[in-house]
Image: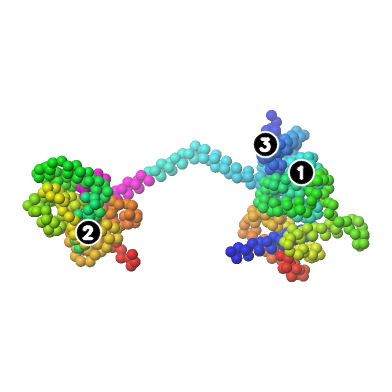
Amino acid sequence: MAEITDLEQKRTEERRLALLVLASEQPKPSGACLTPEELAALVEGKLPPTQAEAGLAHLADCEHCYAQWRELDHEWQEQAGKNSRGALLRLIRRPRFLTAVGSLLAAAASIAVFLNITTELDRHSLTRLPDASVQELAPPAPPPEPAPAIPIEKGIPAPPLSPAQQQTFTAEEQATTPSAQPSESSKKKAADRRVEERTRADLTAKPVQPPAKEAKRAAEVRQLPVEKTRQMTQQTPASADRIEEKKEPEVASLPETTNAAPAAAPQAASRATGAAPPPPAPLAGATEPLTVTGWQDRLRAGCQHRPAPEFFDTLTIQGKQLLRQPANLQTGERQRIERILAVLGSQQPPEQRCRAALEILGPEPLLR
Amino acid sequence: MNPWQEKALAHWEMINRMAGRRFGQTPLAEEAALYVMDGLAQDDWSRLRSFGGRSTLATYVGSLTLRLLEDFARLRFGRIEPPLWIRRLGGLWTMLFRLLCLERYSPDEAVAIVGARLPGSAQNAEAAAYRILGELPSCGEHRGEQTEFDETTELPDAEEDCSAQEQCLEQEERRQLFTVLGRILFDEQAQEPDPRLLERVAEAGLNLDAKERLLLKLCYRDGMAVAEAGRMLGWNRHQVHGRLRRLLERLRQDLAKAGLAEELRLLL
């Protein structure tokens, strides 16, 4: 503020000094006034230097010519501005210019399409994300209850259910409860069919997987719920929890299915037995909401020791669950998770997968 | 149609615009524009025929238009010579004096016209307009008459040593010039500067060349931006800033050499 005041004061002083000096002089016009053409040429800077000097010398002493010089310069500046705009318009209207602009636009559009396709391909090859139809087919889960029966190892919490899944489940519950209870065999068939559909949809979303491995995994998935329901039908609902705990690695090993698929298996089993759905697994951290930081912490913690293959599958499922919540993710985080998921799904030994994933993850931040 | 007439009509829009700028958007401006066309058509378009091609025709027509508009104003309102202090200040002061005291525009209208004719001057013009009205209470009363002296002008005393009446008048005019100039340049509340001091400044022999005087006029009297003033004088923005700085420094040094350093420090 003080600097501004100083500057203003300095300018005032300069102005006073200049006006004092100007007023103290008694100039007398030198020579005749400029002709209209001389004045016009002076304004346009087309007078020879000597004549221009003489013209300016006259202007310095003749207030009448000085005023005309200023006004004409103002008018000329306006004309020049208009002419430059007119030249631009004329240039734009030329057919050659339009052709060039059209070609450039076409080239730009081609580049944009090419880049878009390349990016899409990269994304598919990196992440193998399930498409929207799979998300819609995701199995229902009870909305008010905490995430049930996700196979959790070493304190990994279950992924939260999306509202769409909760709505689907509620609708299904309402549809089944008032009517008469269907037979056990029909329930079993329905559960098997649902899991099959989910698995099929999931398989369509993974174009880069080797076909042999995919077929093997699909066969495992088809067999697993059937065996599981068979075992569960022989148990009481109370013992189903214990079975579930014991079978956690098995369920967790459901590879590349939708994230809610593990949760669907015990529910299907409970429906098959006609019993109420089992209470959620009382593991530590199971009710915690899934966050990016938590997921990264689990990855770091799990990779400190020699991790089991199920560990990678669980992390993959949870990572995909995170990717379906774009509002919580920044662009950088999304890309990082996608890259980590690609590494976790690779065929490398667990140690190498861990190392590569931790490299992508970077060092753990000191402050959170 | 005469080709020169066609060329003149092609510039009709510009002529109209310049007339509007000179007289405001009034019927007078339309009348003035028609007067310009008549002036151009005079003697079978002799003014246009004398065009030598040293500039563009549009600028040449603009220059002719300004001259003809001034002729129209003189025909319409007559001639008037402003007081010495206004002549010394020149520029927008002279223009405002004509608009206020001769053409009898209101202060706001006069300021608007000056702002349109001399862009960048509007801020200085308002203060100048009210200063002129304050210093010349009879401004506009004696239309068409010489208003160099009004009833406030004191005639020289007979006791003073004046060898001739003309010399006495000149001295009185100078005294009035420095008195008014002191009020304009310096704070009114402050003690009025001694006219003799200002006279000593005038006698200090500050030799300004034409471009330097124009630079000071454009920047400090008419309120134009320094870079814009430089463009009009053929200097780029770096050159003009450097020249202005050196010029002000030289003026201070010259005044200090004339023994006015302390007085100027107190005044400025």
Which residue position is annotated with label 2? A286
Q: Mark 1 — residue?
A: B103
Q: Quadrant of residue A158?
A: bottom left
Judging from the image, mark 2 belongs to the subunit labelled: A
| Residue B91 visible | no
What crowding class fits label 1: few (fewer than 14 Cα within 10 Å), some (14-19), or many (20 or more)?
Answer: many
Residue type at numbered disc 3: Trp
Of the numbered discs in the image, which one, if any, rests on residue B12? 3
Horizontal side of A60 relative to B241 (left or right) equals right
Q: Residue at x 60, y 43 (%)?
A: A82
Q: Are marks 3 and 1 in contact (CB under 8 Å)?
A: no
Q: Hey, what amino acid is under mark 1?
A: Glu
SS for callout 3: helix
Q: Is residue A244 above or below residue B102?
A: below
Q: Is residue B65 magenta?
A: no
Name the quadrant containing residue B235.
Answer: bottom right
The magenta-colored residue range is: A112-141
**Looking at the figure, which quarter contains the C terminus of chain A?**
bottom left
Disc 2/disc 3 C-alpha distance (Å): 86 Å
Chain of residue at mark 1:
B
* Residues beneath discs 2 and 3 located on the same chain: no
Secondary structure of the residue carrying tag 2 is: loop
